[in-house]
Image: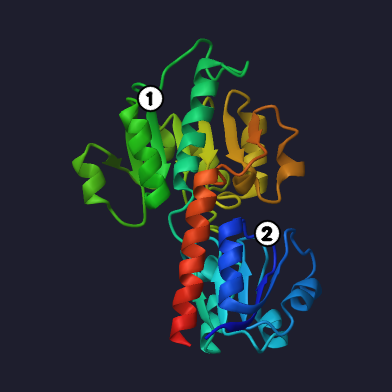
Amino acid sequence: MKFKKIVGVDETLLNTAAIERLHELGEEVVMYHDFPSEEEEVIRRIGDADCLLVSFRTPVRKNVLDACPGLRYIGMCCTLYDPASCNVDVVEARKRGITVLGVKDYGDEGVVEYVVSELVRLLHGFGGVFWLDQSTELTGRKIGIIGLGKTGRMVADALRFLGADICYYSRTRKPDAEAVGMTYLSLDELLQQAEIVCTCLPRNNYLLGEREFNLLGNRKILVNTSVGPTFQAEALCHWLKACPNSFYLCDATGMGQLKDLLTPYANVLYTPYISGKSMQSVERLSKKAIANVETALAQL
């Protein structure tokens, strides 16, 4: 059995081997390598496809599902952590009998390396910008991780290996993390006590507002590894203005749609690259996305 038509509606990052495999799994395969800006274009591209592949960037909402009744499978070439926060209306799709699968644990290693790299540059002034008045190591620095899922735990483990004192805030306590010396704090306590804060949250989780940034205070570093902001944009801007010795660090994924708003600030250190887009992560993503297509096809 094959899918009648497979459409990759945007840049899913699938590699050549994966696309070749798709041609074995579908009678027709159409792959796009840009990002449609209008819902009408999304609908046009999908057309009569029964298999849709999509990245985290393109919304696939009820209107799209209404217009594309032939869909039987939606493969999210990204993490499906929480259906409520996805760019795909997972709940509505599943109501219609459409199988929706996501890909887990493919870009975390690159994200961890990004966090370590950018913190080391800033703490030592390797990029010409110093956090403090002189070079300092990660050793002994109190670092708070907000969200101790897969990415958050990997970041915490890496920074702990380099000598940082790790505390964390999460919706649930993590006994295994506490067993190796990571301290659980409430969000308020973490913001007040940590010198460096790293948000590792699912998309559309906005935990930081004016109150939280007031607790965070000056001469702090905020690093965002999430897809899009984890804060109210206006509140972050107020913090950046009021606390010139503090810094906000993010890559292209973390920046989301806020580039024009945030990059004018001198204390925003923006890396215009997706840290989870290494050769290895693309390979992992491609293999897992294809495995999901094969699983979905076998169940039809």
Q: Amino acid at mark 2?
A: Glu
- Rendered image: mark on residue 141: 1
- Which x, y percent locates residue 161? 31, 30
What residue lies at 71% left-to-right and 85% top-to-bottom?
48
Q: Amino acid at mark 1?
A: Arg
What residue lies at 60% left-to-right and 61% top-to-bottom?
56
Instruction: Return the residue nearer the eye: 19 or 276.
Output: 19
- Which x, y percent locates residue 47? 74, 82
What residue lies at 63% left-to-right and 15% top-to-bottom?
128
As drawn, the residue found furthest toward the top would be 134
Does residue 202 appear in the picture of this structure? no
- Which x, y percent locates residue 185? 32, 43
Does residue 116 appear in the picture of this structure? yes
Point out the frontmost of discs 2 and 1.
2
From the image, tell me which residue sits under label 2: 11
Instruction: Return the residue nearer the eye: 166 or 29.
Output: 29
* Element marked by disc 2: loop
Instruction: Return the residue nearer the eye: 209 or 150.
Output: 150
